[in-house]
Amino acid sequence: MKLLDKKISIIFLVFIISSTGCVYLRLLQVKRQLNDFENNFELNDQNGLKFVFKNPVLLSDDIIWLMKNDPLSTEQTENGENWVYVLEKQYLDEDTDKVNYDIPMLFYLRDDKLVEMTFPERFLKNLSKPLLVKMLGSMGKSEISKSTRTAGTEFKGSNSDEIPKKRYIISVLGEPYKDETTDQTETLTYLYNLKKSDMAKENDQFDLKMTFSFRDNNETLEKTEYNFNGLTMSLSLVADEKKSNE
């Protein structure tokens, strides 16, 4: 009986690993597509920052797995379906921001695949579309570790003007949850929870942590890191010093 239970447990474990493995394979495919950004994606600045998948691979179940919950609301369209998620900004002091800095995200699906993601218009405030394309394209070169569930890459700006500044981060995301300076590095931390519907799963908590690091007394971003659902993505940013000094 114990042997049978062990076999059942092993079969169940293999099933779980293979199921989540399919998600990772599709995420890896998206990462590879970023290497050829123009043929696989499009950025649109109408009614917000819209990220279009020309060759969609992520499924509706992948989104639910990543977000740990069903969407806050859905809407049927003529050719597909709109899903709405909202990331609620967390505060140490509720009076810190007088403006709503929550992040609504609109996912548009067609034939059960993600074809568009739309973010608030303020994300375009200080970044041009060509620069965003360049930054997103650099993520296609990221090194991925499935065992540690991490991905990291470097973005090299043609000059210092292409590297986001501290004031831009604050104008888009508001005041940070925490602002710390250690070893001459200033780090802004932002925390978000997922806004849930009344039918949301109580046990599954989505948490997003974003950090932005700057050298002390330097307004230029050096590294940013995003951690959600146990996945960590990091991006180091450097400027071409030769071009910056020309």
Image: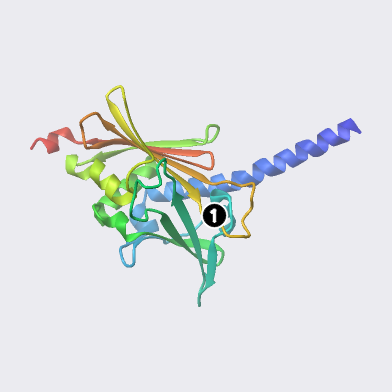
Residue found at the very far front of the displayed protein: 95
35 horizontally vs 205: left or right: left
Residue 91, quarter of the rendered image: top left
Residue 198 seen by the camera: yes
The quarter in which the C terminus is drawn is top left
Counting from the top left corner in percent of width and height, residue 169 is at 29, 45
Helix, strand or loop under label 1: helix
Which residue is drawn at the image coordinates 61% and 60% (left, top)?
A: 198
Q: Which residue is mark 1?
A: 63
Residue found at the very far left of the displayed protein: 246
Which residue is drawn at the image coordinates 24% and 28% (left, top)?
A: 216
Residue found at the very far bottom of the displayed protein: 78
172 is higher (above) or lower (below) than 185: below
Query: Label 1: few (<14), some or many (≥20) within 10 Å?
Result: some
Which residue is drawn at the image coordinates 36% and 51% (left, top)?
A: 36
Counting from the top left corner in percent of width and height, residue 144 is at 47, 36
Residue found at the very far right of the displayed protein: 1
Counting from the top left corner in percent of width and height, residue 100 is at 37, 56
136 horizontally vs 151: left or right: left
Which residue is drawn at the image coordinates 29% and 27% (left, top)?
A: 185
Residue sitting nearer the eye, 94 or 107: 94
Residue 164 seen by the camera: no
Amino acid type, residue under disc 1 in the picture: Ile
Residue sitting nearer the eye, 216 or 80: 216
Residue sitting nearer the eye, 189 or 8: 189
Counting from the top left corner in percent of width and height, residue 67 is at 54, 51
Residue 1, quarter of the rendered image: top right
